[in-house]
Image (cartoon, grey):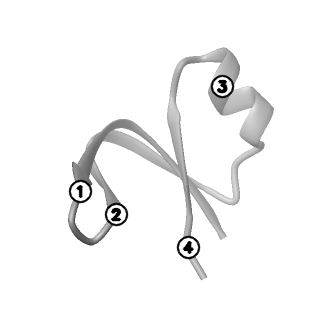
């Protein structure tokens, strides 16, 4: 599953990215997110 969110927090030690703010788009198209400058996170 791909989650796309407006803002993402980075936890450096664990290398985790979590959605912080804004809409979350589940199973979003990666290129669509990039075109809108939205971060994508791949979750299993």
Mark 2 to mark 4 CA distance (whole Å): 13 Å
In what element is the residue under mark 3?
Answer: helix
Residue 34: image tag: 3
Q: Who's the residue at 74% across and 41% down the image?
A: 30
Q: Nearer the viewer, mark 1 or mark 4?
A: 1
Mark 2 to mark 3 CA distance (whole Å): 20 Å
Q: Mark 2, residues whose alpha carbon is within 10 Å: few (<14), some, or many (≥20)?
A: few
In what element is the residue under mark 1?
Answer: loop
Mark 2 to mark 1 CA distance (whole Å): 5 Å
Question: Picture quarter containing residue 1?
Answer: bottom right
Confirm or deny contact between disc 2 and disc 1 (CB under 8 A).
yes
Residue 12: image tag: 1
Q: Which residue is mark 2?
A: 15
Confirm or deny contact between disc 1 and disc 4 (CB under 8 A).
no
- Please indicate whether residue 29 sits to the left or right of residue 20 in the image: right
Confirm or deny contact between disc 4 and disc 3 (CB under 8 A).
no
Q: Who's the residue at 51% across and 29% down the image?
A: 38
Q: Nearer the viewer, mark 3 or mark 1?
A: 1
Q: Mark 1, residues whose alpha carbon is within 10 Å: few (<14), some, or many (≥20)?
A: few
Q: Position of residue 10 (x, y in %)?
A: 26, 50
Question: Picture quarter containing residue 21?
Answer: top left
Q: Earlier in the sequence, mark 2 or mark 3?
A: 2
Q: Earlier in the sequence, mark 2 or mark 4?
A: 2
In what element is the residue under mark 4?
Answer: loop
- Please indicate whether residue 6 sits to the left or right of residue 12 in the image: right
């Amino acid at each position: 599953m791909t989650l796309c969110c407006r803002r993402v927090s980075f936890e450096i030690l664990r290398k985790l990215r979590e959605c912080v703010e804004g809409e979350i788009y589940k199973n979003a198209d990666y290129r669509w997110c990039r075109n809108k400058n939205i971060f994508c996170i791949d979750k299993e």
